[in-house]
Amino acid sequence: MSIIEPSPLIDGVQIARLKLWQDDRGFFVETFRKEWFPQRSWDIVQTNRSESRQGVVRGLHYHFHQVDYWYVPRGMIRAVMVDLRPQSPTFRASLTLDMGEANPIGLFIPVGVAHGFAALTNATMTYIVDNYYDSRDEFGVLWNDPELNLDWGVKNPIVSPRDMANPRMREVSL
């Protein structure tokens, strides 16, 4: 059975340590169960797939009306998160976590936690959200803000113009 653990660094982030069932044919893994996250009334309305070349950095993004659940079935990524919730006991805390084929986990990211990832290899990520994409609920923080001092684990990152234009943390009003 998979084990669900709270993050020791960011309140509300949960890590699903997934159980693989393997034999000579391959493996099976249960990647998500609604019951793993009873604090959230899950209405899964959208699932997404992201393909990234090694060295790509995506983020930091955050939402006020959407949670994310990430799973990486191919390759490896470094997930990076920062708690942006002023009322949270872990406000401004950060967490980095390598996940993918060599570390098969699921990652629950609550509302108000900025999140992004760096592709440590060519990678595929699937993610489940509980709300339809809405550009009015899409916000960001500069991925390499020196005040945050985040370790993305890549040299010469490939970053979109949109993510390069995100404001620094001190410019964000929450």
Image (tube, rainbow, N blue to C red):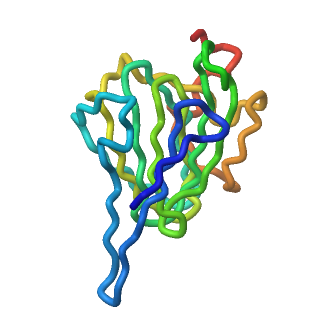
Percent x, y for residue 34?
A: 29, 42
In the rendered view of the protein, which quadrant contains the C terminus? Answer: top right
> In which quarter of the view is residue 7 placed?
top right
Q: Left or right: where does residue 141 sit relative to residue 48?
A: right
Q: Left or right: where does residue 84 sit relative to residue 51?
A: right
Q: Residue at x 54, y 28 (%)?
A: 113
Q: Left or right: where does residue 43 sit relative to residue 6?
A: left
> In which quarter of the view is residue 89 placed?
top right
Question: Of residues 166 and 64, which is closer to you in this image?
Answer: 64
Q: Is residue 135 above or below residue 77?
A: above
Percent x, y for residue 79?
A: 56, 47
In the rendered view of the protein, which quadrant contains the N terminus? Answer: bottom left
Q: Residue at x 67, y 48 (%)?
A: 152
Number of callouts: 0
Q: Residue at x 49, y 27 (%)?
A: 62
Q: Residue at x 45, y 40 (%)?
A: 108
